[in-house]
Image (spheres, rainbow, N blue to C red):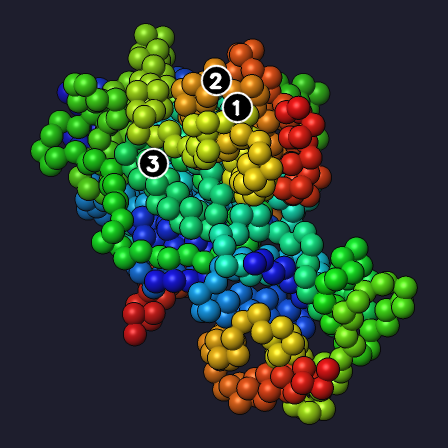
Amino acid sequence: MQLELRLSGSGGQGLITAGIILAEAALADGKNAVQTQSYGPEARGGASKAEVIISDEIIDFPKVTRPNLILALTQDAAAKYVDASNSDAMVIVDESVELSPETGLKKLFRVPIIDTARHEIGREIVANIVALGLIVGLTQIVSQENLEATVIKRLPRGTEDLNRMALQAGYDLAKQI
Amino acid sequence: MIKFLQGNEACVEGALMAGMRFYSGYPITPSTEIAELSAERLPKVGGKFIQMEDEISGIAAAIGASLTGKKAMTATSGPGFSLKQENIGYAALAEVPLVIVNVQRGGPSTGLPTSPGQGDVMQARWGTHGDHPIICLTPDSVTETFYLTIRAFNLAEKYRVPVILLTDEITGHMREKIDIPDPSEIEIYNRKRPETGDVYHPYGVEPGEIVPRMADFGSGFRYHVTGLMHDETGFPSNSTENARKLMDRLMAKTVTYRDDIIDYEALYTEDADWLILAYGGMSRSARAAVKVLRQKGHSVGLFRPISLWPFPEEALSALAGKVKGILVTELNYGQIKLEVERIACGRCPVEFLGRGNGEVITPEMLIETFEEVAK
Amino acid sequence: MNHPLAESYFRMDKLPHIWCPGCSHGIIMASIARAIDRLGLDKDNVCIVSGIGCSSRAPGYMDFNTLHTTHGRALAFATGVKLANPKLEVIVISGDGDLSAIGGNHLIHAARRNIGLTTICFNNNIYGMTGGQYSPTTPTGDKATTAPYGNIDKPFDITKLAIGAGATYAAKVTAFHVTQMDKYIESAIAHKGFSLVEAIAVCPTYYGRKNRKGSAVEMMTWLKDHYIDFKVAEKLPPEKREGKELMGEFINVDAPEYTALYDALIDRLKD
């Protein structure tokens, strides 16, 4: 089975880090993973994306062509990266994002990701980690155990508690869906 | 040790394991991570990193460092590769071991700085003026980037030829799992140096050899290095007979030792009546397409040159005599296709799918084209 | 009988050199050898690097580790040699065109880094090897094969350029003032950090003939009559300074040297 994920938002929201964490957690689970990202001015604001392929098999073509899961944290990112051609894809957007009801997306979720980071955790910067908790809570694409271990390994020392809270907040959001 | 790295990062890991102790270069997308990681890692192993004032000095300083005995590398992309050409020729003529990485991007001129391309393959072969030997290797994964970087250093040291590691934005920037081996598992080749006390002719060769021994500057062999045609002593010579001897010897390097240098992958080619030929990042797409096409009942194989220069001519020629056709796919307007046509020499049709707009050709596009041309 | 200095420091089988009769380059090259001799440097640890041009042929005659590179790039190659092996005493020989036109960027950045290279500029105000085209130091109004109606460019003052870019030692001297040249080149090599000696040379064949400057002797006499030390000039009344060119040791200061800083970084990272 092969899963293709596209994580998008604005530059600086930590989505490339989130993509790397997800891929590394998949490796820890014994799967294969490839991560790619958009380069250029997007890395400094504007719409930015990271893409991850997770598979039990060897991954030949490294680019995402038909995402099974799309995350968009901003309106700009949703406009640019939500691909409505695959109506079966799971699409998770921040509650601040408005999508036309005509997209035909069957699995569209609007979730207060940024608001949760800002008000429940108190730091908007952890919105990417809240989103990871939410995605993994909804899909179990990687184990929660390896997700948490990778988050702690990849992120700066001293932020462990903050990031654990963010992950838990994401899992809680998933349960409410 | 399992790591999750970008191709550009794997290149530096490979270079360090090969013994790189000097890096000089100039920042340019999409190769910059190679400079950044070298800057971080080299001083920790007693090596040197310097960000030079431009691309030309980036390669020039690396050549200077190599002459003192250090294994040296520089990395760049499109525009920088053009600027480095003159000194690539210098390294070829003066026989200075050197690794030049070109992470290819899209288009001529400034083009598409953050998108992949494969438009530099002919420049890698013929970019500098005058005939010259060159070795060019092209990896298709993060792991292969690691191993080919080591191989690039080994070949540069062994044959005293500049080696171009020609990657692209696809393999340079994607992250993949890589199992970095213990250094004891890696074979490292170091340049042959003259014995103390020898009468040293820096460009003289032992009987039966074509690669001269190389003394480090500062090791007691005071000799002359020049980009002019020179004789065995290293001093300039205008003699046409001498120039012929020198050029013959230089050009023989990649011919005489081609079996040691040439590398390729042939996947499902034994029974194949069609071939898809791809290299570097594009072979990822081709590999996926070949697998799908075989499931659909096509007897198709993948031929992937790993050494682009010298090109795996004999292996491809043998296959070209057996198959019904070859579909070449590359991110340019048909540069390697010309080479494939030359080798196929009319024995089978050579079809083509290429582009130069910064987009990767997907397996789906390739499958569609294949089914059209291989009817 | 050969001079003992020549026997010690030159590749006798490569001489005589290719330079024209009356050319100053041999004078400057010999001055470099004398400086190395007085400093007692081990020949095996001296590396002489050059670019392309008349002056850049000098290393071929000199019995050291010698590197004749591409046009303009001597300082860039030399930077690699020096950083890779700081024990080497690296001396760059470069002409005015090589150093300040095609290689100008490397000059300012080598000076900025204060890397321990000694640059000796053989400045004859012309591209000699290619037959007399104007260079960045050809005076305005002078003729060259590519300035048949007189040069409209303004010339560089290479010494000032190096000082402006951060050179910690810089001196200007002429091929006539050999005693001072010997002293400046010796000081420049001994200096820790980037040093430059601009040696004004005469090219009777191209520059001289094109601009009716007379014989080599007359051109050398002109250097003698027109160049004065800037410290002497400061004490002269204005009328006596008129028409004079200034030479001398313009800067000699201590500052951290680049390869030493890098070695200190390596040591720091060992902890």
Gap in Å between the C-alphas at discs 3 and 1? 37 Å
Q: Is residue B118 left or right of residue B260?
A: right
**Depth check: A176 or B359 in front?**
A176
Amino acid at circle 1: Asp
Nearer the camera: disc 3 or disc 1? 1
Residue shown at the point (25%, 41%) measured from the top left: B189
Asked if the residue under mark 2 is in contact with the one under mark 1, i.e. CB atoms within 8 Å, the reply is yes
Q: List the residue tagged with mark 3.
A: B156
Please determine whether, in this image, residue C107 is positioned above or below residue B256: below
Q: Is residue B70 left or right of residue C133?
A: left
Image coordinates of residue B363 in percent, x first then y, are 63, 42
Q: Is residue B207 left or right of residue C181?
A: left
Amino acid at circle 2: Lys
Residue shown at the point (68%, 58%) measured from the top left: A67
- The numbered mark, 2 or 3, whose residue comes first in the sequence reads 3
Mark 1 surroundings: few (<14), some (14-19) or many (≥20) residues within 10 A: some
Task: Please state the chain letter of the residue tagged with numbered disc 3 in the rendered image.
Answer: B
Mark 2 surroundings: few (<14), some (14-19) or many (≥20) residues within 10 A: some
Image coordinates of residue C246 in percent, x first then y, are 52, 45
Residue closest to the far front: B297
Question: Which structural element holds mark 2?
Answer: loop
Q: List the residue tagged with mark 1.
A: B273
Amino acid at circle 3: Ala
Q: Can residue A52 be seen from the camera position used here?
A: yes
Please determine whether, in this image, residue B287 is positioned above or below residue A120: above
**Dot label at residue B322:** 2
Q: Quadrant of residue C114?
A: bottom left
Task: Please state the chain letter of the residue tagged with numbered disc 1 in the rendered image.
Answer: B
